[in-house]
Each structure stands twice: as structure tokens, then as C-alpha cells.
Image (cartoon, helix red, strand yellow):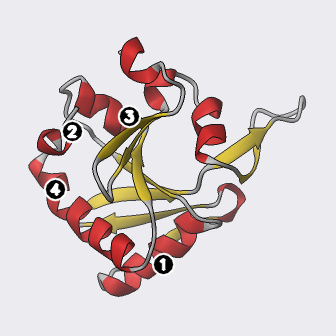
Amino acid sequence: MNLKDKIPKDYIGIIEKITKIASDNNYVIYAVGGFVRDLIIDREPNDLDIMVEKDNGGIEFARLLSKKLNLSEPVIFEKFGTAKLTVENREIEFIMPRKEYYDENSRNPDTEIGSLRQDALRRDFTVNALFLRLNDMELVDLTGKGVKDI
């Protein structure tokens, strides 16, 4: 399935810039969740989350991007290992693969670095566990059910 041709024009330039910096600096990055699902079902995505496959990768990569693209410093969410940047008037969240643990007294999870598979399995629906590896535009369905469930 060729999803590259389905990426909306206003995201193409952003993704190309981000992917070039990722590749030049040995990062593997993925568009995840609703963005990928929306591409598959021909719906216009309204947000972009980028998973960075590296320990503390989301925060580290967002900081690198802010320097390389001369952007404001990212907003950091240490507890979740995420960062948010505005690129060409689009808010983009940069995340790491993670696993979650819930305390019975809280609805908010404790998180820690996990594998891509652990991240896919923690997601609410298989269709939100689809990853588009931006380095080579390969669709990754670690549950084996995401595309079928769509």
C-alpha cells in the first residue's frame, strides 16, 4: 500500500524536512496513530504524531529539529517522554515507543521506554497501532490486524 501519495500537500514538505534530518542523524521515525489510519481511509489527517525509535528519542529529536529548522524550543512533557513543536504552523508531537502501567487509584499511566511492539499493543484500537516508517514509507502493522480491521 503506497501511502506517500496520500499525504496531504500541507504535510509533505514538513515530513520531507523531518525525514531528511532524521536520516542524516541516524534516527528511525514513524508517523503513528490517527494520521496513518486517516491516510488509509482517505480522510484528511488533522494532526501528526512522530514516533522516534530511540531511548528518549522524542525529546532528543524535537530538540535537534528545533535547532536545525530554527524553531522555538519544543514544549517538553518529561513524564511521558514527549515533546511538541510547531513546524510550518502545524503542531507536531514527538514521542518514544512506550509501555504503560496503571495504578488502581489513578487514570493517568506511568510510562517507560518500550519497544515498537509494546507501544502497538498498548494502543486502544488496532487501527491506531499502525506505523508509517517515514525513512522508507513502509507501513508497519505489528498487531497484524490494523489494516484488516479498517
Secondary structure under tag 3 reads: helix
Distance from disc 2 to disc 3, alpha carbons, whole Å, reads: 14 Å
Element on which disc 2 rests: loop
Q: Is residue 55 left or right of residue 103?
A: left
Q: Is residue 48 left or right of residue 146?
A: left
Q: Residue 95, how many percent across, how many down?
A: 53, 56
Q: CA distance from mark 1 to mark 2?
A: 27 Å
Q: Are marks 1 and 2 in contact (CB under 8 Å)?
A: no
Q: Is residue 21 above or below residue 52?
A: below
Residue 117, placed above or below residue 85: above
99 and 110: which is toward the camera = 99
Tag 2 and tag 3, C-beta contact below 8 Å: no
Disc ID at residue 63: 1
Give amino acid for label 4. Answer: Ile
Residue at image location 51% in from the left, 68% down from the top:
75
Mark 4 secondary-structure assignment: helix
Which mark, residue 34? 3
Instruction: Answer with mark 1 or mark 2, whichever residue precedes in sequence.
Output: 2
- Of the residues under marks 1 and 4, which one precedes in the sequence? 4
Work out how far the residue at label 1 is from the one at label 4, CA to CA, in angstroms: 21 Å
Q: Residue at x 20, y 28 (%)?
A: 43
Labels 2 and 3: the sequence-earlier one: 2
Of labels 1 and 2, the one closer to you: 2
